[in-house]
Amino acid sequence: MPEVKTSLDLLNYDPHTGILSVEGVPVTYHCNVFNHFFAEGIKLALGIERGRELIYRSSEFAHYRLFSTLKHRYNMSPEEMVTFGERYFKSRGLGVLNIKNKDNITLIASTHANTYIRILRSFSDIPVCDVERGFVAALLEVALDTPPGSLEIEERGCLAAHDPVCRMGVKVLHKPVELPGVDCERAPLYRVPGAEERMKLMEKIMKRIPAPDETGIISLDSAFSDIRKVWITQLPSEYYAYAKTRLQDMADENVVKYTLTLAGFNCVFMTYVSVAKTPIGDIVFKGATNLDERARRFLSIGNYLGFGIFEVPYLRYNGSTCECTVNLYNFYENNFLRALGREPLSYFLPSAVLAMVSAVYIYRFHESQRHGILMDAFRMFDDLYDRSEFSLSFDIRKNMQTVEMKVPIG
C-alpha cells in the first residue's frame, strides 16, 4: 500500500504538457473557494437536487477511475483500499475521513462545508458535501469490486447544516447507475517547448506546497487583504470536465454558456488572485515589473496547477481596451470532450482572460490592499461579459484552444 501524507505523494508533473497526474490519472489544484462557486453554479443552473446529483455523480465517476487505477497498480485488498482512501482524502486537503462501517462514516473539518460557512456567513438547510459523497462511493465500490453506481452515499448530517461533523451512510442500489467509459488518452497531448524552464520553476513551487494539518486542510499564508489563508484542494480533473460536459446536455445553451463562463471567471480570479500573494505567487511573479508581464504571469500560474499550458502570443493594452490572443494547450476539459468524440471547445479560456483583465488591469490586485476587491470583481462580471468580444478556435494537431479577445475597460 503506497504511503500518502501530502498532496505531492504519488504526484507526477509533466513539464512538456502542463499535466499533473496520479498514476496517469489527471488531477488539478484549485483554491476551495472556487470549488464552492463551481458547485453553487451547477445547482443554480439545474436546481438544487439535480445539481447535487450531478456533482455527486461527477465526483464518483472521476474517483472511480482514480481508485481503480491505484488498486490495480498496488494490488490492495479491500481493507487496505479503505485505509488508503482515508489517508488519500486527508492528503488532498479535503478533511479527515473515518469509515467504520456502512452506517458510521464521518467527515471532520470538511473543506467544502467550512468554505460554505465562511463565504455565506450562515448555515445551509441541506448538506453540501456532494464531492465527498462521490469520493466515498467510488472508494467503497472499488474496494468491494462492485460496478460504479452500485452504492448510494447519503449525507445524514453536515457541518454546513449546523451539525458538529458530517455523517454519511451507505445504501445498496439494486440497479447500478451507468457511468461513461471515457479514455482521455485518446486525446494525444502536445509537447510544448520550454519544458526545462517550467520544470525548474515547478521544483521551486513544490517545495512551497505544505502538507495538510491535523484537520486535513492544506493552507497557504496569503498577504492579500481579503484572504489571509488560502485553502487548496487536489481533485481529479475529470470531476470538473464531466460535470461541465453533462451540464451542457442538461440545461439551456445560454444558461450553460453564462454559468460556465462565470465559473471559469471565478476559478481563475479566485484561484490565481488567492495564490498570487502566497509563497507560490512570489516565485511565479518574481521579476514581473510591468502590467503586461504581470498579465502573462497571472495566466501562467495555471501551468503549475494541472490546467495544461497557457501561452500569450499577443497582448495590447492602451488604457481603455485590452486586446489579446491566448492559447491553452492540453486543457483537461478539451481532452475529455475529444475522448467523447465531441467538439473540443471550452468556455474556460475566454473566462480566464476576463479574470486576468479584471485582476491585473482593472483592480491591480498586486498593488491594492483595498478590502472587498473580490466581491467587487464578481459584481462587475456581467458588464465585462456583455461588452467583451471574442472568438474561439481549436487546433487539433497541437491540442490547442485559442481565444482572440477584446475587452473594454472603464
Image: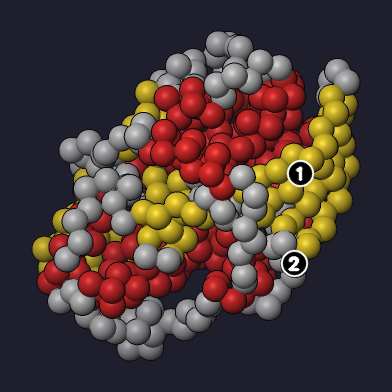
Residue 303 in view: yes
Amino acid type at mark 1: Val
Q: Position of residue 242 (x, y in %)?
A: 55, 66
Q: How was this image coloured?
A: secondary structure
Q: Position of residue 27 (x, y in %)?
A: 45, 56
Q: Is residue 397 left or right of residue 372?
A: right
Amino acid type at mark 2: Arg
Is label 1 in a helix, a strand or a loop?
strand
Residue designated by label 2 = 397
Q: Residues within 10 Å of mark 1 (few under 14, many from 20)?
A: many
Q: Residue at x 53, y 77 (%)?
A: 182
| First-in-chain label (1 vs 2) | 1
User: Which of labels 1 and 2 is toward the front?
Assistant: 2
Residue designated by label 1 = 326
Q: Quadrant of the N terminus?
A: bottom left
Q: Residue at x 61, y 64 (%)?
A: 189
Q: Residue at x 68, y 32 (%)?
A: 296
Q: Position of residue 384 (x, y in %)?
A: 79, 34
Is label 2 in a helix, a strand or a loop?
loop
